[in-house]
Amino acid sequence: MDKTFKNEISLQLTGKSWDMPDDIGEWLGRLLLLYGVPFNYLVPEEAMLPPESIRFFFLDPGWMKSLLEGACSVGKSSSMDELLDQKLRDKFLDQIGTKARKVRAGENGEVNWPLTGFLLRSDLVDGWQGLEMKASGVDRQGNRIDPLPALRIDRLSPDIMLCLFNGEVTEIEIKQPPEGLHFGAEYDPGSNTYHKRTLRKLAPAEQAGDQIDKQVNIAVPMRQGTKRVVEVERLASQMMEKLTGESAIEGPDFTSAEFSVQMVESPGKATFTVPGGAAKEHG
Amino acid sequence: MSDLEHGLIQFFQAFLPPLSPGDYAVTVDQTVREVRPESFRSELEFSVAGPRFSLNPSDVYSVYPPANQSGAFGNTLPHIVFTRRTLPWERTMAGGDQDERTPCPWLALLVMSPSDFPDTGDTAKIEARKVEALLNPGTGVKGPDLKDSDLKHYESRDDLCNTVDIPRALFSSIVPARADLPFLAHVRQVHTGNKETLSLKTDGCFSVVLANRFPETTTEREGIRNTAILVSLEGFQKYLHGEPGTIKEDKVRLAVLANWSFLCQGENTFKTLVRDLKIDLLRLPPPSGGTMADDEAAGEVKKARELGYTALTHRIRNGEMAVSWYRGPLVPLLYHKLDTYRYVPCADAALRYNYETGLLDVTYAAAWQLGRLLALQSPHFARAMYRCRNQERQEIKSQIEQSALDRKYQLSGKDMDEHVMDAIRSNPGAFE
């Protein structure tokens, strides 16, 4: 291309802003969240993500820029396009970030680089639908952000989950889904009996759900002549009696709601800290 | 219902459906005295249908213990969670309306294990049969106390449903008592803020049916397979545990609305799985010592792995095979987003060569090429991109042409007509 013509184009492009059309932006926004990127591009070797492991990562902006640039290279036909591309290069990562935030929750605003997240490969993913992932992190000034909004939480295969957050994760909490929480009692294999050792307050209202300090010991009543069949109504009335004794219940009603509160085994949860504490910087 | 704070769970005794399943008629009378003394009347008949002999699988949100999972579930009462919050109370065992003070579910979750079937050593067998075969099961088998005439016009004797035959003694010993049933179903509301994107659809209000029996467990490694079966108790109200009705037949046939099985064994609960998770950054473990020929290479590999690189076989364009470094978009260390990136016109321009090791780094070239392939794979996107580029191109071109013209004629302030007039005035002879 002749040099003056090239200068001419550059001149025209000075100060030019480009509003990305929505259909292009949405597609690129999803690409920034790695939708459609084959798994072996994310994790090229199995040893990086062995069974029963959790692996934290940073999203490499250089990689994402290359991916998006490759995607945008379609339809290029003359060197004039290249000049436009060069011009827009630095802005489009930000523009696409804005689109990416809309994908999950329809939020507005830019993404906060660095984007980080983790891969979880475990029977947990398979066995407990709707695991809750809560992340907290730090911003560039080192201030704590809690909770850190999620950009993507998805199952990539039955036992692998990918989570991507809008900012730098320092800690995540994985919680058993509350509607997948379970009911039960303590089992004593020696005597082959089941016991309820703690009860929860139902009153006063602001303490509802808290455990009663005092240990109780209700042997779960079993139906005579059967194996492991609970006499539910008798168990309920024994609980009611104990709770009344502790003034932890108001009113005469003890329904399935009150019974369930007592039978719930607390949902399991665990907190993981990103190894290495503050992130190592590079580049 | 009030909004719940994150992490809170609220329990409710029951949610009764506004209308229980059945046939209804709406009659409207209107008298317009000015027109005629008799009233105008309009009637509309409609039916409220509800699940009866089978259940839509999408009504089941989850089960616990998880289906086909093995774990230490011996101390838990299995339960099933429904997306419909009224489901357990949509019918009654004897027909008729729900008792609003102590609503009683029409469903029960039965838990069985092979030891309940000492003769066969097998577990309960679920079979698909016609509704006909459930209502009139033949000699030796007791079905629900329902007659063909109890079927609604939208239900058919030929509909298929899942059924199970269980020995009379087993049924009587494990079926809940009438007084137990109201405690075995409830509704819970949870806040769904931080779930997988898929689960965001539900409003967080679920109904739950709880079993009245603990699963059988063992310390043996292979575990014991327990089966949980959700059955309809409609028509069995006289034969619940402790009720006076007696079953003469050897077996009882029940409609099965859901069933799953799980293994009870050892330690594999949520808590143990979580405790045993291995935490690290996403990268290969350091190479195990002793295999590298020289220390320098070993050091190089160790360093690369720390940075998240993987050595992959690379088929170079001239057909040679080589080993090149690759790293995905998920890296174990922080790279800041730059304000300006180098422009890369094609994938090869993003290849990086290390003169010291003689190895290529294909990371960004692979990313670039993948982006292009994904874009070409999506015709919608590729077309939109092309359209958009074309438009930009036209715009720039016309701007350049315009500015070239502008400069040539030094058009500042005057329009073309004035220029022409000026030219004529200054040199009249030239236009004759």
Image (cartoon, coloured by chain):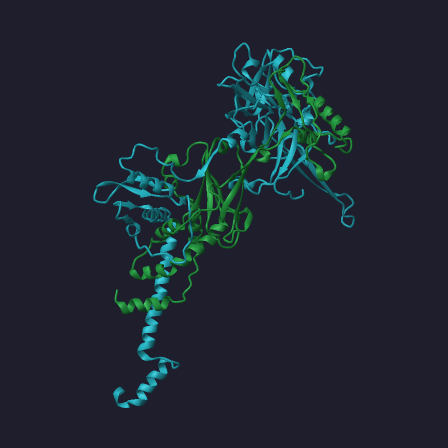
Chain colours: A green, B cyan
Q: Within the image, what quadrant is residue B208 found in?
A: top right
Q: Which quadrant of the figure contains the N terminus of chain B?
A: top right
In this rendering, does residue B179 appear at all? no
Left-right relation of B29 to B338: right
Quadrant housing the C terminus of chain B: bottom left
- A49 w.r.t. B393: above or below: above
Residue A228 coordinates in the image, percent (x, y): 62, 18
A182 lies left or right of B385:
right
| Number of numbered discs overlaid on the protein picture | 0
Q: Does B157 appear above or below B321?
A: above
Q: Residue furthest top?
A: B119
Q: Is residue A139 above or below residue A175?
A: below
Q: Is residue B145 above or below residue B248?
A: below
- Position in image of residue B411 (x %, y %): 35, 79
Q: Give whichever of B390, A87 is nearer the camera.
A: A87
Left or right side of B390 for A159: right
Which residue corresponds to the image point at 33% horizontal and 67% vertical from the top-left? A9
Locate residue B199 relative to residue A53 in the image: left or right. Answer: right
Q: Residue at x 31, y 86 (%)?
A: B423
**Residue B167 image offset from top left, x and y in percent:** 59, 13
Q: Can the viewer see residue B169?
A: yes
Closer to the camera in the image, B9 or B170: B9
Relative image position of residue A279 (x, y in whole percent): 46, 46
